Image (cartoon, helix red, strand yellow):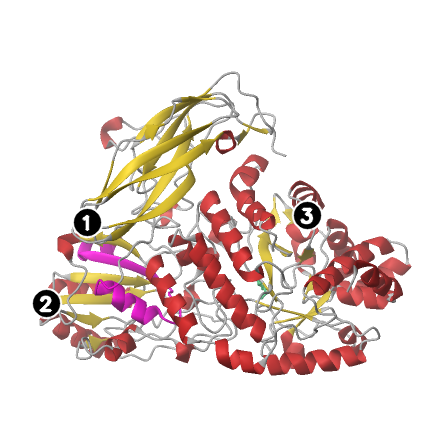
Amino acid sequence: MTESALRALINDLTLEEKIGQLVQLPGYFQSEGAVTGPAGDMGLTQDDLRLAGSYLSIIGAEKIKKLQTAFMAQHPHHIPLLFMADIINGYRTVFPIPLAQACTFDPEGVEEGAAIAAKEAAAAGIHVTFSPMADLVRDARWGRVMESAGEDPYLNGCMAAAMVRGYQGKSLHDRGHIAACLKHFAGYGAPEGGRDYNNVELSERTLREDYLPAYQAAVEAGCEVVMTSFNTLNRIPSAANEWLVKEVLRREMGFTGMVISDWNALEELLAHGIAADQGEAAFLALRAGVDMDMTSPVYARNLKQLVESGKVPLAWVEDSAWRVLQLKNKLGLFEHPFKDADEEEERAVLLSPAHREAARKMAEKSFVLLKNEDHMLPLQPEEAAFIGPYVDHIYLNGAWSIFANDQDTVTVKAALANDPRTRNVPVAPGCPVHDADQPIMGFQQPVARDETDAEAALQEAVELARRSRKVVLCLGEHRECTGEAASRGELTLPKCQLRLLDAVTAVNENVIAVLFGGRPLDIRPLKEKTKAILVAWLPGTEGGPAVLRTLLGESHPSGRLSMCFPYCVGQMPIHYNHLSTGRPFHGDCHDGRFGSKYQDIPNEPLYPFGFGLTYTTFSYSPVVLSADRMKADETVTASVTVTNTGTCPGTETVQMYLRDISASVARPVRMLKAFVKISLNPGESREAAFTISEKMLRLYDLSMRYVSEPGTFDVFIGPDSQTMNKARLTLEEDSMAQEME
Ligand code: NOJ
């Protein structure tokens, strides 16, 4: 539809119809769709339902076509509905959880995964996915770390932008593409105490420097929709934060698309204590710039009266309705209200062999090898027994894969059985996946108890471990222990699994742990008792084959931690790019009392950000700079030569970090600025080169201007965030400070 036709359409709508565009209804109103938040009837009338703008969580080409047809037939202006859903790490073919995807350090691969998810979801009738989540995370207690790209602003931004490109393609009109909804704006990843929905307090400097860049990257990649967050940010709930939405998101970041609240967040303004009633909540949210109300009655029940009484200007409603209609138009819904919904296409693409293969490859790239003593890995096909509750566990998808069928998941046990070389490998569960005294609540009901007989399983496992050369021990948190509303106060493995670990390692000294789950855990016992640790996260549909291929060396691990593994929960929150403090502690316990440290645990995590081993080894030359001084309008190349010093091919993720030695405000001890993956054969060397520009050296200065300041910088290049391989660069005095456009 042309813009003028769209204008004519909106001008012709009644007030009720305009308000209707701002309303998103939950799928369960049509007895369909997953319930992904507290459910109620919202007190809406049939009229409210008739005029709605969107449905959430309804999927399936046939259903959506039927609903769209019936809805448009009865709508006074035949305006199509928008169908939105949480397609987080795949639709039916499930890719690894986003935290694991980020461990690939492979934005192109992540883009490809998002494109596949979009293709499947589009065929099933979806128009918008609630992804990517670009919330920076520093606290593994928060269950939603699994949906994030981790603790680093730059990596987070690379991944968010890649997902947007993958979902949206070149044009939303194109077949197989859907709109991306960036979330949760802003700062949702920093809830106090790691407790979901809790308050967030961030200084404006920290917000801008660390938390906003990833959202900005997604906006720059063209994402069409942004979701506000549940939390208060510095005491103001995001869904009512005019400064955040209008000033930061729209004016500064240049976002022109549609803004939607999170589930029921407008009604929750009452619980936050900033609205006395729904009418006030509607006023505050619309004034803030929230265009669409996700599954609360606030807009539907109150805006008409507010506009008619003059409390809410009609222009606010019209501006928001315009943005909703524009999105529908960009998706081509006025001409093709079903967009790509197509039963035949669904049959062809959902879980297609090509999609499964892509999911498996991404899973392999996301695995992080933390430890590999005595060359435990790779394994010969028949040398190890497979023990542990995750050996035959089908829930490898992550809590958000609400539209996938768990029966489609290939477990490790199934992968062993499918390969003639491993068909006879003995397996045993060893224990239940979670402790009986720790019931887990799923989205809608408690997770069914694992009925494994703990004692019998333990005995069987110990006997098996005793007579095996090596043991692969598959452990981890249940997937419902992470995701929304799944915060934890402890970061340990379930007690039954720790008991199994003790028992197995007591009788076999060659134990390789494969760790599943959606967050970094306190894995000190694993580090102490096993010889190798492979983090497999929640690897998705093809998780089992990906794990087996990696253990057998058919695929070589190359993933790097997107979030550190802490020493223990007491370190939370933790991130590598912290400030130095005036009393930095250098690790010598005899330093005396007055360093910034704990008395009983180290400052350093167990495994740092960016860390990950391969089956080979790499050496790095010293860092070479093309010049050791630069002016603001110049660039410098920083390079290293990386050599594969081991005996098999491998892929190394070369990372460049910068540290500003002295600035007008305290600076992080280092910040990731670039990375590159290089694959090398044994004995082969290659140069990895990075361009340093003035833009990379900027900071929010004393007056909150985003500028670079002349001075010295350390340039670190190495395999992880603890590398000390560095050179020194000077940004010259005459450099012109440049404000961010
Ligand atoms: C609440 C979650 O916070 C959000 O991420 C999700 O997209 C919506 N529910 C819709 O399910």
In the image, residue 652 lies at what x, y percent?
30, 48
Q: Which mark is residue 108?
A: none
Mark in front: 2 vs 1 = 1
Q: Amino acid at mark 1?
A: Pro
Q: Using the numbered discs, state the Cα–Cα distance from disc 3 to disc 2 in whole angstroms.
A: 59 Å
At x 68%, y 83%, the residue is 66
Q: Which mark is residue 682?
A: 1
Q: Amino acid at mark 2?
A: Arg
Q: Using the numbered discs, state the Cα–Cα distance from disc 3 to disc 1 in whole angstroms.
A: 52 Å
Residue 516 vertical position relative to residue 606 in the rendered view, above or below: below
Question: Badge 3, how many Cα within 10 Å: few under 14, some, many 20+?
Answer: many
- Cβ of mark 1 under 8 Å from ligand 1: the answer is no
Asked whether, in this view, residue 455 is left or right of residue 159, the answer is left
Residue 553 vertical position relative to residue 524 in the rendered view, above or below: below
> Residue 374 or 276: which is nearer the viewer?
374
The residue carrying mark 2 is 469
Q: Secondary structure at mark 1?
A: loop
Asked whether, in this view, residue 332 is left or right of residue 430, the answer is right
Question: Badge 1, how many Cα within 10 Å: few under 14, some, many 20+?
Answer: some
| Quadrant of the frame with the N terminus | bottom right
Task: Please check the rendered image and state whether residue 359 is part of the magenta-colored stretch, yes or no.
Answer: no
**Upstream in sequence: badge 3 or badge 2:** 3
Q: Secondary structure at mark 2?
A: loop
Q: Amino acid at mark 3?
A: Val
User: Where are the magenta residues, as a range?
Assistant: 525-554
**Upstream in sequence: badge 3 or badge 1:** 3
Q: Are marks 2 and 1 in contact (CB under 8 Å)?
A: no
In the image, residue 210 lies at what x, y percent?
51, 41
Q: How many marks?
A: 3
> Residue 169 or 216: which is nearer the viewer?
169
Question: Badge 2, how many Cα within 10 Å: few under 14, some, many 20+?
Answer: some
The residue carrying mark 3 is 245
